[in-house]
Image: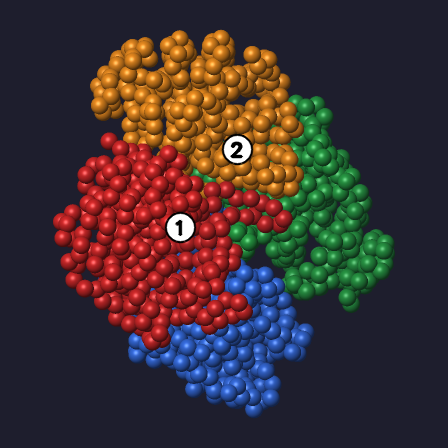
Chain colours: A green, B blue, C orange, D red
Amino acid sequence: MTIRVGVVGTGVMGADHARLFAREVRGAVLGGVADPEEERARAVAGNASVFTDPLQLIRSTDVDAVVVASPDHTHKDTVMACLEAGKPVLCEKPLAIDAAQCLEIVRKEQELGKKMVQVGFMRRFDPCYAELKSTLATGSIGIPRIVHNQHRNARAPEWFTAHMALTNSFVHEIDVTRWLLGAEFVRGHVTEAPSAGDIPKGDPLMITLETDTGAIVSTEVFMNADYGYHVHCEIAGTRGTTSMAHPALTRTRLDRAERGAFPENWIPRFADAYRIQDQSWINSLLDGTHKNEGATAWDGFVATTVAEQLVTAIDMGAPVDLTLPEHP
Amino acid sequence: MTIRVGVVGTGVMGADHARLFAREVRGAVLGGVADPEEERARAVAGNASVFTDPLQLIRSTDVDAVVVASPDHTHKDTVMACLEAGKPVLCEKPLAIDAAQCLEIVRKEQELGKKMVQVGFMRRFDPCYAELKSTLATGSIGIPRIVHNQHRNARAPEWFTAHMALTNSFVHEIDVTRWLLGAEFVRGHVTEAPSAGDIPKGDPLMITLETDTGAIVSTEVFMNADYGYHVHCEIAGTRGTTSMAHPALTRTRLDRAERGAFPENWIPRFADAYRIQDQSWINSLLDGTHKNEGATAWDGFVATTVAEQLVTAIDMGAPVDLTLPEHP
Amino acid sequence: MTIRVGVVGTGVMGADHARLFAREVRGAVLGGVADPEEERARAVAGNASVFTDPLQLIRSTDVDAVVVASPDHTHKDTVMACLEAGKPVLCEKPLAIDAAQCLEIVRKEQELGKKMVQVGFMRRFDPCYAELKSTLATGSIGIPRIVHNQHRNARAPEWFTAHMALTNSFVHEIDVTRWLLGAEFVRGHVTEAPSAGDIPKGDPLMITLETDTGAIVSTEVFMNADYGYHVHCEIAGTRGTTSMAHPALTRTRLDRAERGAFPENWIPRFADAYRIQDQSWINSLLDGTHKNEGATAWDGFVATTVAEQLVTAIDMGAPVDLTLPEHP
Amino acid sequence: MTIRVGVVGTGVMGADHARLFAREVRGAVLGGVADPEEERARAVAGNASVFTDPLQLIRSTDVDAVVVASPDHTHKDTVMACLEAGKPVLCEKPLAIDAAQCLEIVRKEQELGKKMVQVGFMRRFDPCYAELKSTLATGSIGIPRIVHNQHRNARAPEWFTAHMALTNSFVHEIDVTRWLLGAEFVRGHVTEAPSAGDIPKGDPLMITLETDTGAIVSTEVFMNADYGYHVHCEIAGTRGTTSMAHPALTRTRLDRAERGAFPENWIPRFADAYRIQDQSWINSLLDGTHKNEGATAWDGFVATTVAEQLVTAIDMGAPVDLTLPEHP
């Protein structure tokens, strides 16, 4: 059996998903792509059908399952349309632009009585994060006590704000740390740097969270770190630590220095993670379980609601208690 | 289109290829497996056909292409049977047990007038080696002057000899260094360590080769290095060097030390290489070119003839000139 | 000229200073040692005079300058006695047990109109920290925006509290970060981990400080990190980062892992720092300037008052503004 | 007691020794310096006496012990003059320009019946090499089976030849490997690279030695490695390996790469080694033993005779047996 995947949105991420389903993922083909910019859609479609209206793609009999990679504000309606059409959906993060919208999706899926939604928190499929999690599972480092994350981009657009750093970037750490620790966050504090030169206020951010398992999670989000794209995670437990190695496969020695390269952005860093995520999603559809390590709609909601509550903490300049509604 | 692959030999390597074609490689299915030990074959076959006679598998209409992973001494006849049946073949290294047999295959393929054979020197598909090669191609390290290889196994079987270290292990470095440098070897010298405790004479070996491009290639082959499986390559040029980073994705700190793990053997180290190799082979069949980065029959012959000539060097205790017949 | 140094207190640190002045530091000899436990004093004295009363040592005509390495609560009186005797003093950190006492020393020294006191914040003389500072001075990493410190001990005594972690351990980071950045702290927040197994509440601590130069300084203090003694510092600026390399000189590969060792405690980690500090102090006495990179009495006061104010922050569970009196 | 050291030769190395005895080494003062270029001598002398004739320095009553750092061809006569004057001598490597001259010194010292000569193979005092040796002594890596050395300079003068690479550079590896392993070399082979661009024939060299303890020692000497000065040593034994870590204390991340610096030349790399060597020499004179980890006249002879015999091997293009006369 082969899953015919439709991709909504053909920007950088959508084009990459389209490529993966057209060429790399086993058990899938690219069934169609949709984008209001038809030319852009056509450029990534290959032999697949092209739509300018995502609803047509979603309803098309050529499409069994849908990837949503259109702009964030369209996620909710597009995912809802998939649910109405009874088609499994892999939605790029964030699941929706606010927690209320995320919760609508959670409830809609629940009404259908079947897991239909996966959120594209691809770090769960990154071999580095997976190895951290399997090391934790062995118990060798004891009980996790403190997690340090670094989330650095070379350069953010000028219009990028500290609020967006929380709701759009830091959501990755919220999700992957919950997944690593099997924990929920109960309290959080955000410290923002003042502006410096052409770097705006709120970059970097230092976020300190506390979990219901007694761990501290400290994260630097630095969107204008300049030297490259760099994601790092270290977990210190009662017996020892585990952390990511530098991601480069090789080292070069030139001009009085040994060098290990950093990528320009997240795409090369997480190329394996995207491939494994998309394959794992297809496998979960082929085997009928619809289940894998991926984030559920509820996970997508939690990431967004925690980020929103931290926006409040930033504005208050003081720690806030973080709350979750009961899992429906 | 889908290639139905038959796997001859269901030992460790054959089983792994069978798994790859059954579950990971896009565009392929497992068409059949053959092994004189029928039970072993059945264990890896899944729904695919099972044969005890490799010739039956090769001739089967359920099989479009063949992987040879049976014992080394059977390679030549099995590959020749594939050629006679007109079926493309991916043969585990070495291509045959001696250079003369390899040359027979080279000639047979040439008579057919079509590239049909790929030799399973999977390191060419390892992302580390690939990054070394792409760094060389940029010219940043200048002209390659010296290559250092380390090829270490945790433990070799008692019956493993220095001759086998050359013809069975070091052939990997012969092939991959030729591929990296685009060079042929013109002279070689082998130094063998005397026995020490339970480690036999000839382990480690230190092999020094000279290329027709003016580079020196020095390789340690140490089959009883005890601490783990470890392959390392460094290339020093007129402007700088490039080398493999430690292969572990994460580091652990425990008991007064930071640790980066080494695998037990080559299978986890080269898991990506085998997957990419097998996918690349299938892609080359699907696109009809039968061409990719993989080793040709001629490359398989060169690796074996160089190793054989170095066996002579070991026995003489002096450097030997290395020669190749004209490429047919 | 040779400085005859008297050492007050012959515990671990005092014994080490005595050894340095007796054998390693050029331009100094060990003039005397004082300890109420005479036997312990005698064991480290060699040919130097032995006193049970520190005041006798301080007033002795055999002693030109004094190192204070007695218990913390005795620091103030001992340093004051040195000032009264007109003898330069190198006092182990903290300068005194509270900020008020430190300020008394600052004022007393000021009355004398001459720099007489150095505080033993030896990290300023550590070659790693010195290289971080010289890298900052080149401007290559731009304007410092965020500093991450890790301060990990293998094991703390049972009676060690989170308050002590601030006033006795974290004072090192307060001092060395001020020195690195040339900045003062204006605001701080402390997050303490709840108890876990046999690890008490408040270990680890996560401390987030803001400087008057617009940098964030985040520090983990983990007194029961188990795996070893480990101090790490990374500074991220607007152009790049600089950070400490793993401190081990060699790597070992054994049992499926490459290892870099961590020391048991701070003494081997900072052996060079203590030697260079003590030599630098002697040099500053020999050249009559009494000045070097070392911490002044004021620096000693600042470290203690910031730590005390953070104790308040811990107790309040919220960020506090950090204030300094005017520098007298 | 204080040793008054006279330094013969005030080039780069002599000036550095003069600085060490004038300012860093405890128990020593700079008693005098000698150089035919009086101005150069005066620049490093400070308050010490200046001589243009080394014999006058050697015989001066202001000088208790002598460092020889004049051009290589003057070593023998200068050292002999020290022996005649009954003054201990630390001679920069090589001890003399050929093995015959070295042996004269060995015999002369023997006639005096007292150890008087130390050869400046400073790597024995380098903390990295010392840690390799102490790791070997624990037995943790088992019996040493293979040693890999890399000896790379950024750039050699145009007149530097492969013969000089053996007698002037590689002598360091000959000495330090004998010291590490407690072994003598019995056979050796040298492979020289052909010329490439502006790099002459014989650079790099690959030297393979066999020891009387059954180890193989392979060394790359690359005088025009361009990227920096880099000395590396790895020892692989029957249970594991130990090797030098990258020598930089800090890492920097800039422009898409993490960097660890290499020095321009050997002076910063071995600054600690020179200081510790010179201190250790003074300590051995102060305690009257004249003994420490340093190389003896015999060690100096062995390094030079092995290098000379390898020059023969280069010229023959084949391995040679290495022999030593009986130790007088």
* Residue at image point 55% right, 54% down: A255
Left-right relation of B75 to B6 = left
Q: Position of residue B308 (x, y in %)?
A: 39, 80
Above/below status of A53 relative to C195:
below
Percent from the top left, x then y, of residue B278?
56, 69
Q: Position of residue B16 (x, y in %)?
A: 49, 66
Q: Nearer the viewer, mark 2 or mark 1?
A: 1
Chain of residue at mark 2: C
How many marks are shown on the rendered structure? Answer: 2
Front-most of B73 and D90?
A: D90
Residue C322 point in image, percent of width and height: 60, 18
Tell me if mark 2 has few (under 14), some (14-19) or many (20+) residues whose alpha carbon lies within 10 angstroms of its own.
Answer: many
Q: CA distance from mark 2 to mark 1?
A: 26 Å
In screen coordinates, is B22 left or right of B312?
A: right
Left-right relation of D111 to B130: left
- When asked about the image quadrant of residue B282, the answer is bottom right
Kindly indicate whether the residues beneath marks 2 and 1 are on one polypeptide chain.
no
Q: Measuring 61% from the left and 38% from the top, which residue is drawn there?
A: C139
Q: Which residue is mark 1?
A: D244
Chain letter of mark 1 equals D
Q: Check whether the beta carbons of the residues at disc 2 and disc 1 lie within 8 A of each other.
A: no
**Residue under the point 64% across and 24% down:** C212
Quarter occupied by residue A220: top right
Q: Secondary structure at mark 2?
A: strand
Instruction: Say which amino acid is labelled 2.
Output: Asn
Instruction: Identify the residue position indicated by label 2 in the image.
Output: C149
